[in-house]
Structure formats: C-alpha cells, structure tokens
Image: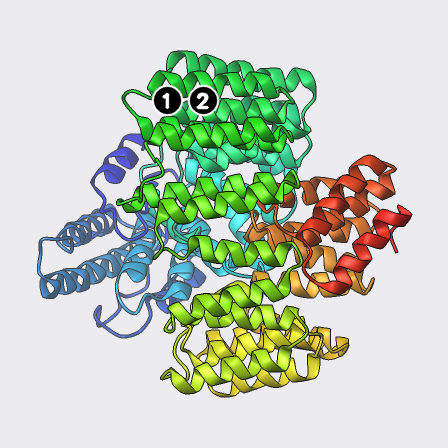
C-alpha cells in the first residue's frame, strides 16, 4: 500500500496549490457497488452534488469489483497525464483542452469507484487551478477525500490552505470559525508529515494571532527542525509576498516570539546566531538590539561573544562590525564598541572607502548617543575625510547624499550640545561643499531658525529661498507651516489657495499614502485633493477644528477613489478631535474600520483618541496593539502603545514601548515627553528631566512648550 502511495505521489501533477495524494488500496473490507455513472461527464452539474449522493447511498454490503477499481485507477492516471500537458510550453488553448479532458477523466474515476479518495483530491485540485476557481466546490471535494480516507495527505492540505484563505489571516480580522478549521487541518498535515515546514509555519502564525505564545513557540521550534519546503509559494502569497519558509525565517520568528514571551536569554542566543549567519538581516539585527537592551548581563555576554567570533572569522565584513558595536552599545560597552568600529574602519579603508566611512558615521552616532559630543564630531569629520570629501564642490550624487547625511548629524550634535554657533557654521560649510544651487543648507537654516525660536528669521529665509526657486511647491508648503506656527494660519491658507490657482491641479486621482501627515505629503503637490487635506492640517495645527473639518469634507467630496476617501476621513477624524467633537471623531474612525478592519492608522488613531480621553482603555490598548502588529516599527504606533500602558498603570510595558519609539524616531517631542512622564511615575526623576528637556528642545508649539516647561519646573505631570 505504501509503495503505491509513493509512486502515485511521484507522478502526480504539481499545479497551483501543489497538492499531493495518497491511495488506500485496502481490500479487506467489502465495498458497495456504486450507482450508475453520470450520463454526461462534461455536464455543468457540480461533481460535488453527485459525490454527496454517492456517499449517502454507500453501504457496506456489496463490494466494488476489481475490474471497476482498476478502471477507476486507470482513469485517474489518464487524468494525471492530461494535467501534465496543461503546463507550458503548451499553448493556452491546448492547456485549456487538456484541463477539460483531465476533469472528465477524474469524474469518470469517481463514477467507477466512489471510494477512491485520490480522485476526489484530484478533482479538488483541478477545480482550484482552472476557471471558475470554485473554492466551495474544492472544499466539498477535499472533505469527501478525507472522509473516505482520513490519512489522505493531499485532501488535508487542500482543506488547510482553503480554510486559511477563508480565515483572512494577514488580510483582516480573523474569522474564528475558519481559523479553528484551518488549525485543525494544519495539525492533520503535521501529523501525516512531521517535518512539514508549511504546516508549522501557518500554525505559528495562527497561534500568534490568537495570543497562544506557548503553542506558537512550539510550532516555530518544529518549523526550525523541518525539512526544506518544496513549494513556498502559497505561504508567500498568503503572507503578502513577505512569507519565507526558510529555516532562517523560522529562527528570527522564534527569537521574536521568545522575546515577546519574556524568554529573553533564549531570544538573545537564537538571534545572535541569526545575525552572525546573516548580518544583512535587518529584522534580526533590530530584534537582537531590543533583546540585549532588556537582557541581563550574562545574556548580553552571549550575544557579544557570538558576534565577536563572527567578526574574527569575517574581519572584512563591515556590517558584522557595525552590528557587534550596536550590541555592545546596548550592553553599555561604549568604549569597546568604539574600538571595534575604529579598527574595522582602518582595516578596510584602503580597499573600501565607502564602507570605512560609514563605520566612522556609526562611530559618531555611538559617541553622540553617549553625549560625548567632541568625539562624535571628530568621527563625523573623519567620515568625510575617509570618503574623500573636501571643501571643494561635489560632483557625484552619491557623494552629495553622503555629505548631506554627515552634515546633518554634525548639526544635530552641536545643537544637542547647545553649541548653536558651531551648528550654524556647519550649515555654512555645507553650502560651500554642496554648492550654491543645492537647497540643503538653505532649508537647514530655516529649520535651525525654527528650532531656536527665531520664527521671523525663518520666515525671511524661506521667502528668500522661494524667490530663487519660484516653481518649488514644497517651499510654498514650508512657508505655510511657518506662518501657521507663527499664529498666521489665515495667511498660510491664502498662500496655499493662491498656489492652487497658479498651478494646474489634478482633481481626484488615485492616492498611495498610508498615514495622516505622511500620506498627504506623499500625494502630488499640485493635486487639489492633497492641497485641501494640507489646509485641513494647517487648521488643525492652529486648533481651528471646524475649518479643518470643512477642508477635509471638501477633499472627500471631490474624489471618487475609495482609498482617497479613507484618507480624507482619517484627516476629518483628526479635525473633529481637535474641535472637541469626540463622538464624531470616534464615529468616523469606526466607520473606516468597518470598511477596512486592518487599517493601521485608523486603529492607532482611535486607540490614541480613547487613551487621551481616558475612555475604554482596554479597547484602546487592543486597537493599538493591532496597529503595532501590522507595522511594528512605526514610532507613532509604538508611542501610542506605550501611552496606553501608561494610562493603565503598567509602567514597565510603557517604558519598553516608548524607548522602542525613541530609538526609531529621536526627533519627536511627544515621544520624549511621554517617556519623561513614565520615568516621573517610576520615581526616576533624573531620567524624567532629561527626557523632558529633550522634548522641550524639539517642541515647536506654544502650548506644548509651556506644558513641558511646567513639568520641568514642578517635576510633576499635570
């Protein structure tokens, strides 16, 4: 029996879902005589309807003759041969005809022997691989196969995959009924093939979505020990093109699950291995950094030792050196990290000046993070020297991009050290190196004026810059933002409307953004829709919620795009919240979530609005958690999550997520202020004051600035 199964699996066609089959040839039990064959095998009648009748009429009294069983098996093999001929390089017409003939052969096989499970599996597969792709029909056929033969691997895998699709895994709110069915079928697949990577990968995803961490970790361990997947395409499609059934993927996911479950030491060990094997894996590097940050001293040593061995074995690999330094910094070993970076840069400078210069930039970041500002500036300057960038005007674009990055870091370092004259001197130096036609120095000077409270100077600078670049609409928006920040929102709106009249506008095209301010900035600048949303944001910034809502509604009215309508509604909800119309803001966001349950911005915004009002905090937390699950490196979402935990009194969790948010975005005054509030509640007043001072240096709104100053003065959260 097993030999026949293996032979059949070896010769059977691998199609859209790559389904295997298994045949039960046990003759020990008598089989009933099937009902008369279907009169017309090419009928439009669904085969599942006939199957249902066959199975209802089965008895255990009359055996199926050997001749009928042999004919049924021959028809099954004939159908398989036709299926082989549906593959390229056959013409589409020939493939369609062969698929039709294959379906006829499989139906005939079922008619001759209604208990031939493999024939039902074959019919289920061809139903999925040829129009009209009937999922419900395929489910009925596969269910018949496993009812007849519970050990039928192909039938169980078809059911597992189809139930996974219907569960909406990774595409929306889980359908609990189909989720449980999918889990049950993947368990069957795993039972029949104990090293099936696909089964354990999907089980781990379902367990993660249903908050079963122990089961998730077990499934990931078994995935890690599984054989290489023969067909990873279905998993990749379901997981949005990001799915990967490789052992490396399992290793990283297991490390992440262990970290989430509090198994920090185990996570550090696994993730160190993953990074040492592939230092280019950004997800593994980020997870390892987080793990080391929360690990005890002995666990940190494990990571450092593992990466040191990798660096010794690959001394010319700059990425490994950078990762090792990053882990050492997380473990508090600043000088050791600096030594690794300096030595690695020196070793490769002669043959790879680009990588050597980047290591110097990383060294500068390490020193800046430790408030060792002079050493940081020296490292940044060394980076320019190693790259060969002098005071002469640059010619190559890649050199220009690198210089801008380094100059930006030098400016920020001097600003953090409160050495403003030196920061301004770097801006002027950048003007010389980049050339007068480059806008970096001018835009950086405008930002410098704004950040130091010199709004009038910023306004003069941006207007001078606009005079030299009349067609640059981004400068128009920048001036409008400066005007709004200076209390002149009406003038700002007039400026935008004036630019709309001068520039031909696109009324209602397709949008491609995904978040309030960011998605608006991603739209075309001469687009009437995006300009109306920008005006709405200006009014929101000025705390004029009614006008903000009117502008958002106007944007909504001029577009037929469903995606853009959602963007307009997101902007409207923010305007309604600003206007104090909390009920309408909540209703707008819930309406969006009815249409798109996995919209991360709507999930985050609704959760944050509820948190700010101290309402429905448990629901708010769940909403924000869903947003973070969808986009785990979004600093705004992490800030919201940390803030929700703070409001719930869970300070350790609040600190963790806010520190994650700061690590991703160190330029948000809101995140630093929230982190300071958490430290204050924990009694860590020195850390609280440091965080608030950082927030104050980044704040540009008067209300926010006054609030942070009060916290610094009183040492208490209002």
User: Which label sits on residue 317?
Assistant: 1
**Residue at the spot 27% in from the left edge and 39% down from the top edge:** 9
* Closer to the camera in the image, 540 or 168: 540
The image position of residue 248, as x and y in percent, is: 43, 31
Q: Quadrant of the C terminus?
A: bottom right
Q: Residues within 10 Å of mark 1 (few under 14, many from 20)?
A: some
- Secondary element type, mark 2: helix
Image side of residue 130 versus residue 291, left or right: left
Which color scheme did the rendering employ for the protein? rainbow
Q: Residue at x 50, y 28 (%)?
A: 378
The residue to which callout 2 is attached is 321
Instruction: Say left or right for 448 vs 707.
Output: left
- Checking the image for residue 382, the label placed there is none
In the picture shown, does residue 432 fall above or below 507? above
Q: Is residue 457 above or below residue 200?
A: below
Q: In this orientation, does residue 515 appear? A: no
Which picture quadrant has residue 693?
top right
Instruction: Name the residue nearer the viewer: 130 or 426.
Output: 426
The reply to whether discs 2 and 1 touch (Cβ–Cβ < 8 Å) is yes
Relative to 108, is 167 on the left or the right? right
Task: Using the numbered discs, state the Cα–Cα distance from disc 2 to disc 1 in whole angstroms.
Answer: 7 Å
Asked if residue 453 is positioned above or below residue 502 in the image, the reply reads above
In front: 192, or 514?
A: 514
Q: Residue at x 16, y 62 (%)?
A: 101
């Amino acid at each position: 029996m097993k030999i026949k199964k293996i032979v059949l699996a070896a010769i059977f066609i691998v199609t859209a879902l790559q389904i295997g089959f298994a045949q039960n040839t046990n003759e020990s039990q008598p089989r009933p005589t099937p009902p008369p064959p279907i009169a017309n095998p090419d009928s439009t009648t669904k085969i599942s309807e006939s199957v249902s009748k066959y199975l209802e009429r089965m008895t255990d009294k009359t055996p199926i003759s050997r001749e009928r069983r042999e004919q049924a098996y021959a028809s099954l093999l004939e159908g398989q041969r036709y299926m082989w001929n549906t593959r390229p390089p056959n013409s589409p017409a020939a493939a369609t005809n062969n698929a039709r003939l294959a379906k006829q052969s499989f139906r005939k096989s079922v008619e001759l022997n209604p208990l031939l499970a493999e024939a039902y599996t074959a019919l289920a597969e061809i139903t999925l691989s040829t129009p009209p792709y009937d999922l419900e029909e395929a489910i009925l056929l596969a269910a018949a196969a496993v009812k007849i033969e519970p050990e039928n691997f192909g039938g169980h895998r078809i059911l597992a995959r189809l139930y996974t699709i219907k569960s909406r895994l990774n595409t929306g709110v889980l359908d609990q009924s189909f989720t449980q069915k999918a889990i049950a079928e993947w368990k069957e697949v795993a039972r029949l093939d104990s090293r099936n990577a696909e089964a354990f990968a999907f089980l781990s995803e379902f367990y993660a979505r249903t908050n079963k961490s122990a089961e998730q970790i077990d499934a990931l361990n078994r995935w890690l020990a599984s054989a290489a997947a023969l067909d990873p395409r279905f998993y990749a499609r379901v997981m949005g093109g990001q799915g990967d059934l490789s052992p490396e993927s399992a290793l990283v996911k297991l490390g992440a699950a262990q970290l989430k479950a509090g198994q920090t030491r185990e996570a550090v060990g696994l993730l160190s291995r993953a990074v040492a094997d592939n230092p280019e894996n950004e997800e593994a590097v980020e997870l390892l950094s987080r793990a080391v940050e929360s690990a005890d001293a002995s666990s940190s040593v494990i990571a450092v030792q593992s990466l040191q061995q990798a660096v010794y074995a690959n001394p010319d690999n700059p990425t490994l050196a950078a990762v090792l330094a990053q882990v050492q910094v997380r473990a508090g070993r600043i000088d050791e990290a600096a030594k690794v970076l300096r030595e690695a840069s020196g070793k490769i400078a002669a043959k790879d000046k680009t990588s050597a210069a980047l290591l110097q930039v990383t060294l500068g970041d390490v020193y800046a993070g430790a408030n060792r500002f002079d050493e940081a500036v020296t490292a940044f300057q060394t980076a320019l020297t190693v790259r060969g960038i002098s005071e002469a005007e640059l010619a190559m674009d890649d050199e220009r991009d690198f210089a801008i990055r380094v100059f930006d870091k030098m400016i920020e370092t001097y600003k953090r050290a409160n050495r403003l004259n030196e920061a301004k001197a770097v801006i002027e130096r950048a003007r010389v190196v980049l050339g007068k036609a480059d806008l970096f120095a001018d835009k950086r000077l405008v930002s410098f004026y704004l950040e130091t409270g010199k709004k009038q100077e910023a306004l003069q600078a941006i207007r001078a810059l606009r005079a030299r670049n009349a067609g640059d609409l981004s400068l128009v928006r920048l001036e409008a933002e400066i005007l709004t920040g200076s209390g002149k929102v009406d003038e700002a709106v007039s400026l935008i409307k004036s630019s709309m009249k001068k520039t031909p506008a696109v009324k209602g095209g397709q949008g491609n953004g995904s978040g309030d301010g960011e998605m608006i900035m991603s739209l075309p600048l001469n687009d009437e829709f995006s300009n109306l949303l920008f005006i709405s944001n200006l009014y929101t910034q000025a705390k004029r919620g009614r006008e903000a809502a009117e502008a958002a509604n106007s944007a909504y009215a001029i577009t037929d795009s469903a995606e853009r309508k959602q963007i307009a509604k997101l902007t409207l909800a923010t305007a309604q919240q600003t206007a104090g119309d909390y009920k309408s803001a909540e209703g707008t966001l819930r309406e969006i979530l009815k249409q798109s349950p996995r919209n991360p911005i709507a999930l985050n915004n609704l959760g944050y609005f509820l948190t700010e009002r101290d309402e429905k905090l448990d629901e708010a937390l769940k909403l924000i958690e869903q947003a973070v699950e969808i986009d785990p490196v979004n600093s705004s979402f992490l800030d919201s999550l940390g803030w929700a935990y703070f409001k719930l009194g869970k300070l350790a969790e609040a600190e963790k997520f806010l520190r994650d948010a700061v690590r991703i975005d160190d330029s948000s005054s809101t995140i630093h202020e929230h982190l300071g509030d958490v430290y204050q509640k924990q009694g860590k007043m020195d850390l609280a004051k440091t965080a608030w001072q950082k927030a104050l240096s980044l704040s540009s709104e008067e209300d926010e600035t006054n609030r942070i100053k009060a916290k610094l003065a009183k040492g208490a959260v209002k």
